[in-house]
Amino acid sequence: MLQTLRKAGGSLVMTVPKAFIDQNGLGDGSQVELHLLGKKMTVEAPTRPRYKLADLMAEMPQGLPRVEGWDEMPSVGLENG
């Protein structure tokens, strides 16, 4: 894929193809890893950790924290619907 470098301030910039952005779930402010080797530069999207609820629950020191009076609170939406 051929890209054209453009001047932006004191730097040169190039665009990232939409297919790469979509495939890796990237957006404005996302960080990527650049690997430089001689005349070659590769861009790598970091892998995002995938969490399982059971693993996260196991890390809780005493299970879920309880909120005093939670069961007596009135409904404010469609909780009972």
Image: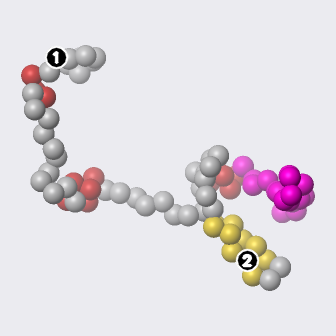
Q: In this view, does 8 lie to the left or right of 68?
A: right
Q: In which quarter of the image is the N terminus?
A: bottom right
Residue 74, position as x, y percentages in the image = 16, 17
Q: Please state the total of marks drawn on the protein image.
A: 2
Q: Is residue 44 left or right of residue 68?
A: right
The magenta stretch spans residue 52: no
In the image, what residue occupies the spot 15% across and 44% down?
65
In the image, what residue occupies the spot 72% across and 49% down?
18
**Residue 70's image quarter?**
top left
In the image, what residue occupies the spot 23% across and 21% down?
79
Q: Check contact, mark 2 vs mark 1: CB within 8 A.
A: no
* Whether residue 54 is visible: no
The amino acid type of the residue labelled 1 equals: Pro
Residue hosting label 2: 36
The answer to whether 71 is drawn above or below residue 78 in the figure is below
Judged by its main secondary structure, the magenta piece is: loop
Residue hosting label 1: 74
